[in-house]
Structures are given as structure tokens and as C-alpha cells.
Image (cartoon, rainbow, N blue to C red):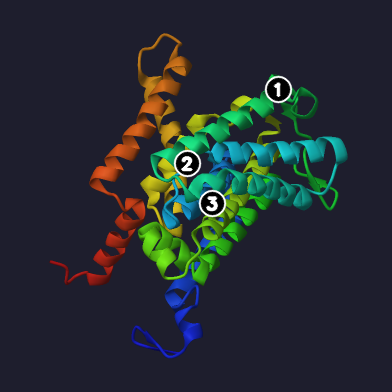
Amino acid sequence: MRIGSAKESYAADAALFDSPTQWRWVALLAASLVVFPFVASQYWLYMACLVAINIASATGLNILTGYTGLVSLGQAAFMGLGAYTVAILQLRYGTPFALNLLAGGCVAMLAGVVVGLPSLRVKGLYLAIATIAAGVMAHFIFSHFTALTGGTAGLTVPPASIWGVPLDTDFKLYWVIVPVTVLMLLGAANLFRTRISRAFIAIRDRDISAEVLGIPLLPYKLLSFAISSFYAGVAGGLFAYFFRAITPESFPLLMSIFFLAAVIVGGMGTLLGSVLGAVFMTLVPEVLKIVVAWLPLSGNATLVLSPIRTIVFGLMIVLFLIFEPHGLAEVWRRIRRLFHLWPFRT
């Protein structure tokens, strides 16, 4: 029961959605997600699946960087581990879809724990360099363990099937990728209401003070790496099923920069920021394609697009850090406050 904005019980205070208005918006969003694949074109179905995969991975990175304050540029490597695990299981053993995704997440999680071990001694730029090194090592494994990973040629992933229905089109994959992403978002939302997330935030804000207060740094940092890497591994598994072919070049350093940019642009330390940032940064390359297509480049648009995209990602990070450090999530909150105060705003 609510009296104004106050709540009479702990359960009401901890509720994920605490007002009828929020429930209506959730119901409207759910209805939109159900209707969308029936009215969308093939292109927008493709984009919706890609956005959902990126949201899942960006949410994992936000747990690590936004909530725990540990900068990572190894998200692509963890996605690659999840993707290759799923591809090998599907190709060689034909194991069930859900089991493959879970295995991909667990393999990436174990790797994340190993990569997170230096986090007790190093942080900031030094930790970022350590995660880059992990990405280089993962790329080496993907390229040189030919018997397992296919080497530079990569692996072709057979379509998964659920209850005998092959997931061989974007329409069918939509009904798997989007629900998995929604479940991961709900899991993160519930995690953010626990003492674990409060420990993460304390470590981010003042790690020495957190340790003095009794929060063991290494276990919580490793837990943050584990959760973040698990999310990346599951997202990588979805990536493998979606594109049906993976190579070592599918998970470059630029992909890690992309996810870091998504977290910064969307808003670090907020679940909404993960969603808005992933959506925004996924659509940016599509806008760039349109812009580059207008330029008189004599058929060299593809060669120009890649460096321009890298420059834009870096520029987005710098501009948002300078002018809007709280990201698009803060912009959204301002818009909500504007409508709450209308017509009495000043």
C-alpha cells in the first residue's frame, strides 16, 4: 500500500515496479515486443535481434564497469569464448539450445574470474590493459587451435532447434533472443536490489573504505567479473546462433570499445543506461552507412566506413564524458521530470 510517494512495507519499497503507471508501461512494452515481428520488415527484425544481443552484453559490462568501477576492454573476448563454446557443442554434439547457452556463459565466467584476479592489485588504466591482454590471448587461441576452433576459417554453426522447430530465420530467432535478453535484464534488475550490488557500489565509490567496513574486495570483484563475463558469454552464444558463422575476427578490440562506449553513452550504473546505450550505439553505424553512401567516394564506402566508425565511437565517449557524464539515462530522467512538472515548469 502506498500513501503518496511513501510505502508502508519493505516489500513495497523493494518492488521492481512500484506504481500502476509503471505496470501499464511494462504491459505496453511487452505487447509491442509481441506485435513487432509480425509488422516489421526483414531488416528491422535483423536489427531487433542485434540490438537485443548488444543489450545483453552491455548489461554485463555495466555490472562490472558501471556498478563496480572496474574498467574492462575484454568484453569481446568473453563473447568470443561463449560463441565458440556454443558453436563447438552445437556442431559436434548437437546438444540442446539452452544447455549450449548456459555452457557458453559458464566458460566465459570461468575466464572472467581468471582475468579478474589482478583486479585486487591494479585498477583503472592498468586493469584495462590487463583485459586487453586477455583479449589478445583469446584471439590467439581462436586463431591457432585449429582442431577445435577451425583457425582463421572459423566455424559454421548449424541452426538450433527447440521442440523440433529449427531456428533458421530472423523471425524464429527473435522469439528466442529477445526473451533471453529480457530474462537477463530482469536478473540484473533484481541483482541491483541486493546487498551484492550495494557492495559493488561501495567498491566503486571508495574501495579502501569498503574494505574497512568489512567488504572483502577480491571475492566481490571476482564475482562482478564472473557475472559480467557470464552475460557476455550468453550474448556471444546468441551471436553465434544469429550469424551462424564465427571467426577470430568476429570479436575484435573494436567490439569491446563499442560496448564500453554503449555503457558510457547510455549511463554507467543504471540498467536503463545499458538498454539506451546499446540501442543508440547499434543504430549509429547504420546512420553512418547512410551518411557515407551520400558521399562521392567512387565505390570505396566500405573502406571508409570502418575508420569513421572507430572515430565516431571514440568521439561519442569523449563528448558524453565531458557534456553528459550520466549518459542518456539522465537525459531520459530530465524528460520525465519535465512532463511531471508541466505546465508548472519554470
User: As drawn, is 277 to the left or to the right of 53?
Assistant: left
Q: Tell which circle, 1 or 3, labels the residue nearer the N-terminal end.
A: 3
Q: Tell which circle, 2 or 1, labels the residue nearer the N-terminal end.
A: 1
Residue 314 drawn above or below residue 323 = above
Q: CA distance from mark 2 to mark 1?
A: 26 Å
Q: Find residue 144 and name its label.
A: 1
Q: Tell which circle, 3 or 2, labels the residue nearer the N-terminal end.
A: 3
Helix, strand or loop under label 2? helix
Q: CA distance from mark 1 to mark 3?
A: 28 Å
User: As drawn, is 243 to the left or to the right of 19?
Assistant: right
Q: Nearer the viewer, residue 227 or 154?
A: 227
Q: Find residue 120 and report its horizontal and vertical position in percent.
A: 49, 51
**Label 1 crowding class (10 Å Cα cut-off): few <14, some 14-19, many 20+?**
some
Helix, strand or loop under label 3? helix
Name the residue beneath numbered marker 2: 259
Q: Nearer the viewer, residue 76 or 168?
A: 76
Q: Is residue 281 visible?
A: no
Q: Residue at x 31, y 64 (%)?
A: 336
Q: Find residue 60 and name its label.
A: 3
